[in-house]
Image: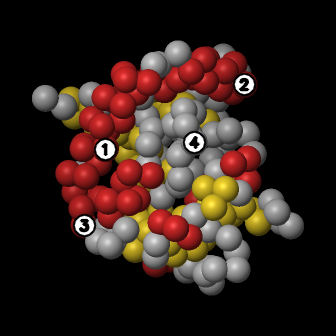
Amino acid sequence: MTTKNIIRQEVKNKRKHLGFFKKRILDSRISKTLRKFKPFTEAKTVLFYTSMPEEIDTLKLIKKFIREKNIILPTVCHDTHTLKLYHLTHIKELHKGYQGILEIPHCIKDTHDHLKIDLCIIPGLAFDMEGNRIGYGKGFFDELLKKIPTPKIALAYNFQLYEHIPYEKHDIKINHIITESQIISLSSSLSSSSPLH
């Protein structure tokens, strides 16, 4: 079986060569689908992540919905190497933090209650049809997601989907994957795909 590191490198190379204009088109399609997706439209409190340049653009979504929803963002706690959650009330609260990722400085907000989150939008490099996820190898989100029992959505390009990827028994599975061409809804025993027209 292909190792996680090989898959990570494959996806990173494909994202790197996607091209600026094609990326904008694909990001727009994925964003429009998410905005109409019932679990998202009904959610009042949403955990987002602030995207890096190669990732699907989540900053536009955060800016659009910051007044309509409670936006929760993770911040890396350097002492414990874990993620703490903070409520974003204004885009100007964001500053470059861990590895240049935009986050809320610890001193601005108190941590948010994990159980009050309605939906999670989470990052990843690769996903499979059983809901498994390969992240960046740091384990930050793996530990965080264990504490949040709500549905989890991954935004991904089609080339980030694999039939099977390596996983551990303790890994938290994704419930839905939205790509530029389909919505994939997953469970422990089956998955369904809805092509976009």
Q: Nearer the viewer, mark 2 or mark 4?
A: 4
Q: Earlier in the sequence, mark 2 or mark 4?
A: 2
Q: Which mark is residue 52?
A: 4
Q: Which mark is residue 42?
A: 3
Quadrant of the image for the N terminus? Answer: top right
For label 3, the crowd category at 10 Å Cα-Cα, with few meaning under 14, some 14 to 19 and many 20 or more, is few
For label 2, the crowd category at 10 Å Cα-Cα, with few meaning under 14, some 14 to 19 and many 20 or more, is few
Task: Write down the residue under mark 2.
Answer: 5
Which amino acid type corresponds to the residue marked 3 in the rendered image?
Glu
Q: How far apart are the alpha carbons under marks 4 and 1? A: 16 Å
Where disc 4 sits, the SS reads: loop
Task: Write down the residue under mark 1.
Answer: 31
Q: Nearer the viewer, residue 145 or 71?
A: 71
Apparent side of residue 151 relative to residue 74 in the rendered image (left or right): left
Which amino acid type corresponds to the residue marked 4 in the rendered image?
Met
Where disc 1 sits, the SS reads: helix
